[in-house]
Image (cartoon, rainbow, N blue to C red):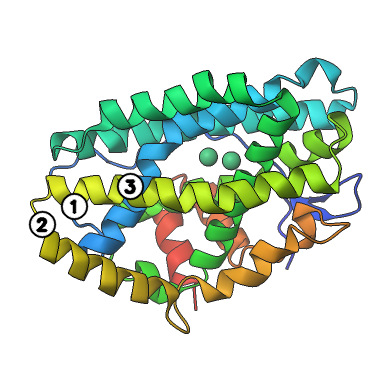
Amino acid sequence: MTHPAVQRSTDKFEHAAIVPREHLDFQLDSSDIPKYWMAGDAFKTRFFDAMSTLFPAGEKFFITSVREFRDRVTDPKLMQEVKDFTRQEAQHSMIHKQFNDRLKAQGVDIDNITKELEFMFFDEAPRLTTATQRLAITSALEHLTSMMCTCFFERKELLEASDPRVRAMYAWHAIEEVEHKAVAFDVLTKVAKAGYFRRNIAMFFVTFGFPFTVARIMNHMFQVDGFSLRQRLGLWARGLWWFYKPGGLFIPTLGYYFAYYKPGFHPWKVKEMPSYGTWLSTFERAGDPIAAGNALHAAGQ
Ligand SMILES: [Fe+2]
Ligand SMILES: [Fe+2]
């Protein structure tokens, strides 16, 4: 059944409204959240933790890249979407900073990770790329983000034995990433007028840059956690198998990933996030993002 928040856009693609949600409490300051909050597994936990360390600087980059074109947006609907996208991403950064404080207390060098990312996004990128190229990178990263959100949350077993508070943070982030998944793409194609090759060259670039960055941060975390070289090699071997094995995390995302390269692609043409309506109706009824995260997880397959 279509949730009332799902509306018909001017693009004739049905999609959810972009709803900025503020003052959410995931109880991230609780002392009983386990260090390896995902099934007690170092690799799986640190994979998601590494992404959390990227968000504050990364989402600031996304906001900056989209807002560079704000003055040229003439469609009032798209203008409103840019504002709502900005508010959602700003909230994500804020909550992930809270979560990253936990990682910092575990010894993860959040300050240095952020410093390196900020150098890459706000020093190197403006020197080496045009505003349109930065927006194309943002659009590509938003596609990878919505791909993970859509594909990971249909896998019930993935987050089965996870701490419900951290899982709820990722569930909320996933929901909002899906809601605003087309904003950077629409500004890129309708306002910056980037064509097929420009958007796909950016996707090719981030396809290698993103996992490389995540892997470097994970390796740092494993060192901080005190794993020897031999233990780290074992973690990587088992972790990469978990990720790339038949039926693992990676293969079911391929259809979603490659859709971006199709001429005529639009983010609302790829598959819907399963159970989006479940999260939304639970959140609206209970006003509790942790209950909504539990409901989203329970609705997985
Ligand atoms: Fe986000
Ligand atoms: Fe986003």
Report the residue marked by disc 1: 222
The answer to which of marks 3 and 2 sits earlier in the sequence is 3
Q: Nearer the viewer, residue 21 or 114?
A: 114
Tell me what residue is drawn at x 49 percent, y 65 percent.
152
**Amino acid on which the number 2 mark rests in the picture:** Phe
Q: Position of residue 67 (x, y in %)?
A: 69, 21
In the current view of this chain or complex, which residue is farthest to the front? 128
Q: Is residue 23 visible?
A: no
Mark 2 or mark 1: name the one nearer the start of the chain: 1
Mark 3: which amino acid?
Arg
Residue 225 lies left or right of residue 39; in this view the side is left
Label 1: state its secondary structure.
helix
Callout 1 amino acid: Phe
Going from the N terminus, do you reach mark 1 or mark 3 first?
3
Q: Residue at x 91, y 44 (%)?
A: 10
Residue closer to the observer: 86 or 5? 86
Pick the front one: 17 or 146: 146
Q: Quadrant of the N terminus?
A: bottom right
Q: Which residue is mark 3?
A: 216
